[in-house]
Image (cartoon, grey):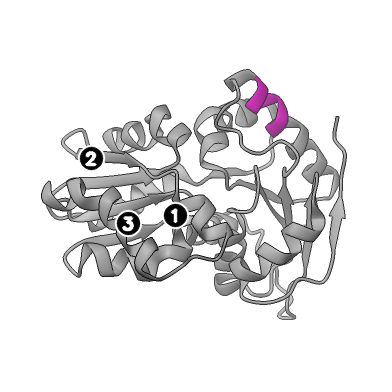
């Protein structure tokens, strides 16, 4: 069973940062990535519809013999993860709980900033996760809708990107947060810019990296880690625009991907 792949799905491309982190931490594990590019974004859809989409994708990944499914979409993690856990017996991980736990472990002042898409911020999922861990934690939140298109267009540095980041983060910096959660899996590509803007006193929590480490720990506890030392493979599935996916994926993974298959779920 341990030779079966880890599956990662997202509404689009952002979950590839989780794939990259998994490949760094678990290089011998094979991975299946599913990007629901035909129905992105999830943030303007109802919870019932997001749950339906997430269930369809999870069933597809289970049919592909996945041993664990990582819900790399923050919106789906917030609105569909509990539904999936009730529906399926396979180990399921979202990105919110690992990010919240990592932030709680590093904050000294217990004042944590959260940035994400509009849908993720409106869900208040990170705030609830943090308060479940420690009800004395204070949060400052900000939706950063321009960050996703900046990443997908490759604007990862430069004056314009820095100015946008400064505008988004000014209130958090003045509020004296000491930890910043990146509540969108696109945002790790902007870490160099974000570090320049927030300075050394604010710790940045990369939800992709923390999710990969969380997955590795759980797989070890379940005795599902691959014993074979050979390098793992990567399979990619999308619901639309495989050419664009391949082009942007190069930016997320830092290398070319071999093949992308198009899937029609419903």
Judge depth for marks 1 and 2 and give the one in front.
2
- Give the main secondary structure, helix, strand or loop, of the magenta stretch: helix
Question: Which residue in the protein does label 1 denote?
Answer: 207
Query: Rounded to the nearest whole Å, what is the CA distance between mark 1 and mark 2?
Result: 17 Å
Q: Residues within 10 Å of mark 2 (few under 14, many from 20)?
A: some
Upstream in the sequence, badge 1 or badge 3? 3
Judge depth for marks 1 and 3 and give the one in front.
3
Image x and y of residue 201, in percent:
16, 65
> What residue is shown at x 19% (from left), y 70% (from top)?
200
Query: Rounded to the nearest whole Å, what is the CA distance between mark 2 and mark 3?
Result: 15 Å
> What residue is shown at x 87% (from left), y 55% (from top)?
261
Upstream in the sequence, badge 1 or badge 2? 2
Question: Which residue in the protein does label 3 denote?
Answer: 165
Q: Is residue 53 magenta?
A: yes
Above or below 219: residue 140:
above
Question: Which residue in the protein does label 2 denote?
Answer: 140
Image x and y of residue 83, in percent:
61, 25
Q: Which residues are magenta?
A: 49-54
Quadrant in the picture for residue 129: top left
Q: Which of 11 and 235 lies nearest the eye of the viewer? A: 11
Element at label 2: strand
């Amino acid at each position: 069973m341990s030779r079966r792949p880890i599956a990662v799905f997202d509404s689009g491309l952002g979950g590839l940062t989780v794939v990259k982190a998994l490949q760094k931490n678990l290089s011998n594990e094979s991975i299946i990535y599913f990007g629901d590019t035909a129905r992105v974004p999830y943030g303007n859809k109802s919870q019932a519809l997001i749950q339906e989409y997430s269930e369809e994708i999870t069933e597809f990944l289970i049919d592909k013999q996945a041993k664990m499914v990582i819900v790399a979409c923050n919106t789906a993690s917030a609105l569909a993860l509990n539904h999936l856990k009730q529906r399926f017996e396979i180990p399921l991980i979202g990105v919110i709980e690992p990010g919240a736990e990592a932030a709680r472990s590093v904050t000294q002042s217990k004042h944590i900033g959260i940035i994400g898409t509009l849908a993720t911020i409106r869900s208040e999922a990170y705030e609830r996760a943090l308060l479940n861990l420690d009800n004395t934690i204070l949060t400052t939140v900000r939706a950063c809708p321009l960050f996703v298109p900046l990443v997908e267009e490759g604007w990862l540095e430069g004056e314009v990107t820095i100015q946008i980041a400064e505008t988004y983060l000014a209130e958090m910096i003045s509020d004296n947060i000491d930890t910043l959660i990146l509540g969108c899996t696109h945002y790790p590509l902007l870490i160099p810019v974000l570090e320049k803007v927030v300075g050394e006193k604010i710790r940045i929590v990369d939800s992709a990296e923390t999710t990969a480490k969380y997955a590795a720990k759980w797989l070890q506890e379940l005795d599902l880690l691959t014993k074979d030392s050979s390098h793992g493979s990567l399979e990619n599935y999308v619901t639309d625009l495989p050419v664009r996916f391949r082009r942007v994926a190069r930016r997320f993974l830092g290398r070319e991907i071999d093949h992308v298959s198009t899937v029609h779920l419903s």
